[in-house]
Image (cartoon, rainbow, N blue to C red):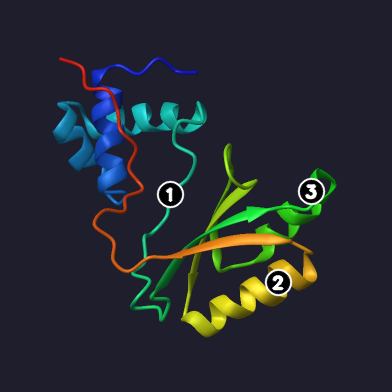
Amino acid sequence: MLDLDALDKKALQHLMAVGRATWAELGQLLGLSAPAAAERVRKLEESGIIKHYAAIADPDALGLPLLAFVAVTLGSHRQRQSFLRAIAKLPQVTECHHIAGDGDYLIKIRCSGTKELDHLLAVQLKEKLQVPYTRTTIVLSTAKETASLPLARSS
């Protein structure tokens, strides 16, 4: 793992907030030339600290206003690989986490409404994948959602 100095952290924080920043903007923020800023980011990419870049779309504008979290309990750990392969193919599932505590996995779902969610739970998970138990929480409103990660601040 690459040791991050204060400039790396500042660059990473800015890129998590403004992914389309130019090298000139980033260089100015860091007090570096544009090529030097680009070189720092290249090292962050090569080390795997920056995994990829993405546009964050508005789910409501795309007709996907329903957000739900579903705790999934598999019937057997032998189902794990087939479950994970199937979940990877479902576009409505935006995150899947192996968890401790109640359930085996926690999945985040974005879809058009309760009818689509019902189909996903009843047909995709329970019927096709033979998932015996799910616990669904539908989100009413979101106070904070970010793709940015907390970085320790250097003085």
Q: Along the polypeptide, which appears first: circle 2 or circle 3?
A: 3
Q: Which mark is residue 53?
A: 1
Q: Along the polypeptide, which appears first: circle 1 or circle 3?
A: 1
Three-letter code for the amino acid on which mark 3 is drawn: Gln
In the picture as drawn, the residue positioned furthest to the bottom comes out as 115
- Residue ID at (24%, 57%): 143
* Residue 28 placement, left or right of 38: left
Q: Are marks 1 and 2 in contact (CB under 8 Å)?
A: no
Q: CA distance from mark 1 to mark 2?
A: 30 Å
Three-letter code for the amino acid on which mark 2 is drawn: Gln
- Residue ID at (34%, 37%): 149
State the SS at label 1: loop
Vertical relation: 76 (above or below) 47: below
| Percent position of residue 60, x then y | 34, 76
Q: Along the polypeptide, which appears first: circle 1 or circle 2?
A: 1
Label 2 Cα crowd, 10 Å radius (few <14 / some 14-19 / many 20+): some
State the SS at label 2: helix
Q: Nearer the viewer, residue 33 or 141?
A: 141
Q: Nearer the viewer, residue 8 or 88?
A: 88
Label 3 Cα crowd, 10 Å radius (few <14 / some 14-19 / many 20+): few
* Residue 120 placement, left or right of 5: right
Task: Identify the residue position indicated by label 3 in the image.
Answer: 81
